[in-house]
Structures are given as structure tokens and as C-alpha cells.
Image (tube, rainbow, N blue to C red):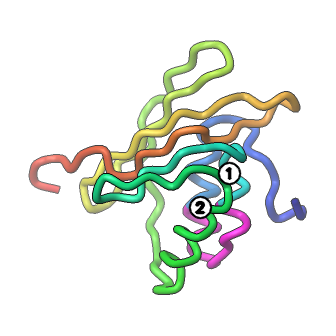
Amino acid sequence: MSNRHQPAQAPEDLAKFFVSRANDGDVDGLVALYEPDAVLSTGKGEVARGAEAIRRFYASLLEKRPHLEPNEQQPTLLNGGLALTSSRLANGVVTAEVARRQPDGSWRWCIDHPRIAKEAGG
């Protein structure tokens, strides 16, 4: 990983890095936020399993060059080396992710459901 792909030192860093890297069109930087065998819900009941599937999903998504706004992060729920993170997006969508502490002390997502719910009125 290059210096621009610095690891998340806290679970809350993951969402911040995600927005920044997505807006930069940095597919490799997005994949670096996940464990090699992570799972990502891609919508429509489909799941991307592993780094290569996650890479393909984000490469396709970023072809459209979307611009993401910073999220409203919800309080992180920690249990040892696991963390449940969640964000409320500007459009009312709520995300849910499970992050795991890595051997070097950094954090990476192992499960990501970026569209778990949409709040009423959002």
C-alpha cells in the first residue's frame, strides 16, 4: 500500500477514508479498506466476496464518477477486536459494517452492507 492508502487507526476512520478515496476514483484505496476475504452487499441480493470481487464492484461503480458527501457517523459499538460501524448518508440511507482489528492494530472491514435501510423522510 502506498502512503496515500494509510491504514485506519480507528474504526471510524474507515468511512472517512471511503468517501475520500471514492471521490478520488481510487479503487485500490477502497479495496485496501477491506480484509482480503471480506463480503460486501452489492444490492439486489448479491454479494461480492473477496478482494477481487470487491475491486470489480467498485471499478464499475466509480466509472460513473459519483461524488459522495461526508456521512453522519453513528457511534461505534466495540467488542474486543470487532467494531460495528454505521453511517447515515445525506439521502437518508443507513449503512452497517463490521470492522476487525488487524494484527498491526489497524482496522479493516470484514462485512459491509452499505444500504441496510432508508429512513422515512430521507
Taking the image as shown, residue 45 lies to the left or right of residue 31, namely left
Taking the image as shown, residue 120 lies to the left or right of residue 73, namely left
Q: Which residue is mark 2?
A: 53
User: Does residue 20 belong to the magenta stretch?
Assistant: yes
Q: Position of residue 23 (x, y in %)?
A: 57, 75
Q: Nearer the viewer, mark 1 or mark 2?
A: 2
Q: Residue furthest left?
A: 121
Q: Quadrant of the N terminus?
A: bottom right
Q: Position of residue 103 (x, y in %)?
A: 85, 28
Q: CA distance from mark 1 to mark 2?
A: 14 Å
Quarter occupied by residue 83: top right
- Which region is colored magenta? 19-30
What residue appears at the point 61 percent right and 66 percent down from the top-left corner? 20
What residue appears at the point 59 percent right and 61 percent down from the top-left corner? 53
User: Does residue 75 belong to the magenta stretch?
Assistant: no
What residue appears at the point 46 percent right and 77 percent down from the top-left corner? 67
Of 100 and 86, the residue lying toward us: 100
Q: Secondary structure at mark 2?
A: helix
First along the sequence among labels 1 and 2: 1
Taking the image as shown, residue 46 lies to the left or right of residue 122, namely right
Kind of residue sitting beneath label 2: Ala
Q: Tell me: residue 22, above or below residue 77.
A: below
Q: Which residue is mark 1?
A: 33
Q: Position of residue 70 (x, y in %)?
A: 47, 60
Kind of residue sitting beneath label 1: Leu
> Which of the labelled discs sits on residue 3, or is there none?
none
